[in-house]
């Protein structure tokens, strides 16, 4: 199957500018000549030691971090779109329609009910509010969030509950490409299995997934291939 | 006819150059109905607030062949009306009258005569505050811009506010009008009862504000429309009583308290109109 | 849409010898909220006023794609047309609500004004529209006939927003819309703005010194320092991966809660 995400020659360094007159800028190269491809139905697990750049790579794919040089191409609206150096509106459109990101932690928006937090990406795609709400409630149910919590803002939820709201929000739209950053890190065993099942369904339905999974069991359940971030220039 | 005006003054009190300047302002005002034309107001022998604007306009246009009527709140016999009439008799040597049909120039404070006016007559209004938006927008720079750009939303807002507060547009006098479909004008503090008389009147209307130094005009047969809402249309005052002297049910009535017991009489405010009905 | 909603090129404004903003350039597309952040004196408010037609820049152009009349250079328009745009297709939310409201007339009159300014003449309909908007900005309907002098700061700000949005503007300029309000009031107002931006597909340019507000409300960010745009990009990218020294300092200066 042809890939829907194609990365080549990706470089990124962090430059910490000196805040005092003494000492110069600090440059930290993290990604060097990264290359990878992911096709529909594949789940590519990023592996490597801590600090090697797994999270940096994932965030760079999403545009959350800005790559220095290289190419990230994604199949978007039936055509290839280059993300490195793309205008903000291109990236925003890709995030709305094509690429989803499950972060480790839910960024809590004050006072919005969790069912509305989950429904929002679907509403942004122009879905009917009724349909978006139904879907949101379904996902929350699958992820084990009791219905009495649906109309409450997640600010007071436990870490595990917040993460499940986060996952529901990221999965409500059917993104062709999914980026997962330790999606199950704050979940207990029972909830973890539910999430694994959900992601497997997406993968088998044709989503192309790139993920970071510290838990070996989770990785083995989901990954079809691995990519070692510590080895530069290796085509996965 | 020999000139019998008081020789200590120029004819009609103002010097010829001043009259020329005021006439130019009047011509410009008539050419732009409802637009306030600034003019170089002179010191007059009475203070601001007593009709100096109206007097300057009358002085600029009056001639020996004119017949002058002066009314104050409809009456020819109040102190102010009498003073101004006497002033012009002295400095302009004109015939004066209390009969509306006989006058060629009528200077008025706060009323329009009940007797319909004819082509060739001139009605001169005394105006305290020429700017209809002044209470809503205190800055002159801004009101000039609003007039120039026809931005009159703020007046509509004040009418909305009146309905919200009182259930109806409560403004009873100095009711804002749109002249010739273009400029918003203050008709001076005449009761709204008189607003319809301004619309397409055959006479020339001149408005003079002495303190504010503005002249504006409504030429004969110009449309003058009172502002309102579709579901709160403009309405004039009505009385259940009729005039105690002449029986009129069509004119603007003043309410007078005639004794210490509080007995009230309703009487025509326009004294000439009332009198002529009684003859 | 094939053209950006708002295009700024080379916007430069000086006050005497002092450069307030220089060479600012960007395109704003429909549905985008662009944040302009910086500290006092960065030039962000000057820039906003140039974009909204309130100040004329010394150099540069601001082009706006109107609803029905193509692209216009807003500073070449007649004052009449610019003021009309400002009353219909644009909104401007001031930091101090008093500057954007008529404090002496009721809330209903405040909201209805834009409608009356473009010719609405049915009192009942105007009042109904005002009621609908009061509801959308979550102000009690029985405050419709009250003057803004009787409103709290947060309520005044909501009223100012309603007054602007009643004409369904396509572009809203906001100058520190939550500045000076209590934290809880700020939070409610931010929720409201977020909801309205989403619901009415608003585009906006939002000036703020508060990075938290930027994170919550904006899609894109421009960081200004001393009149220059030193960094720009997607909001989450600028805040999570700041490149410029000044941006890094700003981000590092946020007090943790």
Image: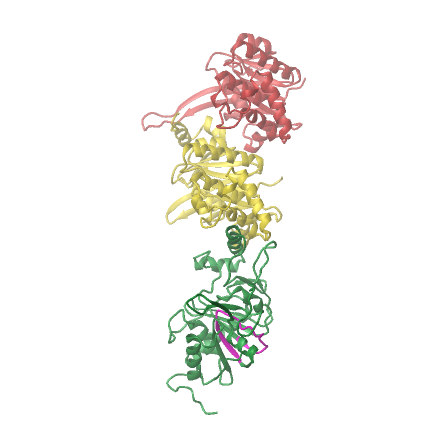
Chain colours: A red, B green, C yellow
Residue C152 rendering spot, x and y as whole percentages: 43, 40
Quarter location, residue B42: bottom left
Place of residue B211 in the rendered image (x, y in percent of width and height, measured from the top left): 41, 68
Q: Position of residue A62 (x, y in %)?
A: 54, 24
Q: Main secondary structure of the magenta part?
A: loop
* Location of residue B96 in the rendering, given as x and y in whole percent from the top left corner: 48, 82
Front-most of C102 and B60?
A: C102
The C terminus of chain A, quarter of image: top right
Taking C219 as reference, is C40 left or right? left
Q: Tell me the quadrant of the picture where the N terminus of chain A can be found.
A: top right
Q: Nearer the viewer, residue B229 or C63?
A: B229
Would residue A22 appear left or right of A112 to someone viewing this image?
left
Label tally? 0
Q: Is residue A196 above or below residue C32?
A: above
Residue C135, image quadrant: top right
Q: Residue furthest bottom?
A: B2
Left or right: C223, with B251 as reference point: left
Q: Relative to B101, is B150 above or below?
A: above
Name the outermost residue toward the left.
A22
Say if the magenta span includes residue B121. yes
Residue C72 in magenta?
A: no
Task: Please tell me which residue lies in front, A30 or B144.
Answer: B144
Above or below, comparing residue B262 to residue A160 in the picture:
below
Residue C73 in view (yes/no): no
- The magenta-colored residue range is B103-122
Pick out the residue farthest to the front.
B261
- Judge whether residue B80 can be spotted in this image: yes
């Amino acid at each position: 199957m042809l890939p829907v995400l194609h990365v080549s020659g990706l470089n990124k360094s962090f430059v910490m500018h000196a805040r005092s007159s003494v000492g110069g800028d600090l440059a930290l190269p993290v990604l060097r000549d990264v290359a990878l491809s992911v096709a529909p139905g594949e789940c590519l697990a990023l592996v490597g030691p801590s600090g090697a750049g797994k999270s940096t790579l994932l965030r760079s794919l999403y545009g959350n971090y800005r790559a220095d040089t290289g190419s990230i191409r994604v199949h978007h609206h039936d055509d290839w779109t280059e993300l490195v150096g793309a205008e903000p509106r291109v990236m925003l459109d890709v995030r709305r329609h094509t690429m989803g990101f499950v972060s480790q932690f839910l960024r809590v928006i004050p006072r919005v009910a969790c069912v509305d937090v989950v429904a929002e990406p679907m509403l942004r795609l122009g879905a009917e509010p009724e349909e978006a709400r139904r879907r949101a409630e379904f996902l929350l149910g699958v992820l084990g969030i009791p219905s009495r919590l649906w109309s409450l803002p997640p600010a007071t939820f436990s870490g595990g509950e917040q993460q499940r709201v986060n996952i529901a929000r990221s999965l409500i739209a059917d993104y062709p490409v999914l980026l997962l950053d330790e999606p199950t890190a704050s979940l207990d065993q029972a909830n973890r299995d539910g999430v694994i099942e959900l992601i497997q369904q997406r993968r088998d339905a044709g989503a192309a997934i790139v993920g970071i999974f510290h838990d070996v069991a989770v990785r083995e359940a989901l990954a079809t291939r691995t990519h070692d971030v510590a080895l530069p220039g290796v085509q996965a | 006819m020999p000139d019998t005006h008081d020789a200590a003054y120029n004819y009609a009190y103002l010097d010829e150059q001043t009259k020329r300047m005021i006439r130019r302002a009047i011509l410009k005002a008539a050419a732009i109905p409802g637009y306030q034309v600034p003019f170089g107001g002179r010191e007059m022998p009475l203070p601001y607030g007593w009709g100096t604007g109206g007097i300057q306009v009358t002085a600029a246009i009056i001639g020996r062949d004119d017949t002058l009527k002066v009314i104050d709140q409809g009456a020819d016999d109040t102190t102010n009306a009498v003073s101004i009439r006497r002033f012009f008799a002295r400095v302009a040597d004109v015939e004066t009258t209390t009969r509306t049909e006989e006058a060629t120039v009528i200077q008025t404070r706060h009323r329009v005569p009940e007797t319909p006016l004819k082509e060739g007559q001139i009605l001169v209004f005394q105006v305290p505050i020429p700017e209809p938006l002044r209470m809503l927008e205190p800055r002159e720079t801004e009101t000039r811009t609003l007039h120039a750009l026809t931005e009159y939303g703020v007046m509509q807002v004040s009418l909305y506010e009146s309905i919200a507060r009182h259930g109806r547009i409560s403004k009873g006098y100095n009711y804002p009008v749109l002249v010739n479909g273009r400029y918003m004008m203050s008709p001076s503090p005449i009761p709204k009862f008189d607003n319809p008389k301004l619309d397409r009147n055959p006479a020339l209307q001149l408005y003079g504000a002495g303190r504010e130094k503005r002249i504006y005009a409504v030429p004969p047969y110009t449309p003058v429309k009172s502002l309102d809402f579709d579901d709160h249309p403009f309405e004039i005052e009505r009385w259940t009583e009729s005039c105690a002297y002449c029986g009129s049910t069509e004119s603007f009535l003043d309410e007078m308290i005639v004794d210490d017991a509080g007995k009230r009489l309703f009487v025509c405010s326009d004294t000439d109109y009332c009198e002529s009905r009684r003859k | 849409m094939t053209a950006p909603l708002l295009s700024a090129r080379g916007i430069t404004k000086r006050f005497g010898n002092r450069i307030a903003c220089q060479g600012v350039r960007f395109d704003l597309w429909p549905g985008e909220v662009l944040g302009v952040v910086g500290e006092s004196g960065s030039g962000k408010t000057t820039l906003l006023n140039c974009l909204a037609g309130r100040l004329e820049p010394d150099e540069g152009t601001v082009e706006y794609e109107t609803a029905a009349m193509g692209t216009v250079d807003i500073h070449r328009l007649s004052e009449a047309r610019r003021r009309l745009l400002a009353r219909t297709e644009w909104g401007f939310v001031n930091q101090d609500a008093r500057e954007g409201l008529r404090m002496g007339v009721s809330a209903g009159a405040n909201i209805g004004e834009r409608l009356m300014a473009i010719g609405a003449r049915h009192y009942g309909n105007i009042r109904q529209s005002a009621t609908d908007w009061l509801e959308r900005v979550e102000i009690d309907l029985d405050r419709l006939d009250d003057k803004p002098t009787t409103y709290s700061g947060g309520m005044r700000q909501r009223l100012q927003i309603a007054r602007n949005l009643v004409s369904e503007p396509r572009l809203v300029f906001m100058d520190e819309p939550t500045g000076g309000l209590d934290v809880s009031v700020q939070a409610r107002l931010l929720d409201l703005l977020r909801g309205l931006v989403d619901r009415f597909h608003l585009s906006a340019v939002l000036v703020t010194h508060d990075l938290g507000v930027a994170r919550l409300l904006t899609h894109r960010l421009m960081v200004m320092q001393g009149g220059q745009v030193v960094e720009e990009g997607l909001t989450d990218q600028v805040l999570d991966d700041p490149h410029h020294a000044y941006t890094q300092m700003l981000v590092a200066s946020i007090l943790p809660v």
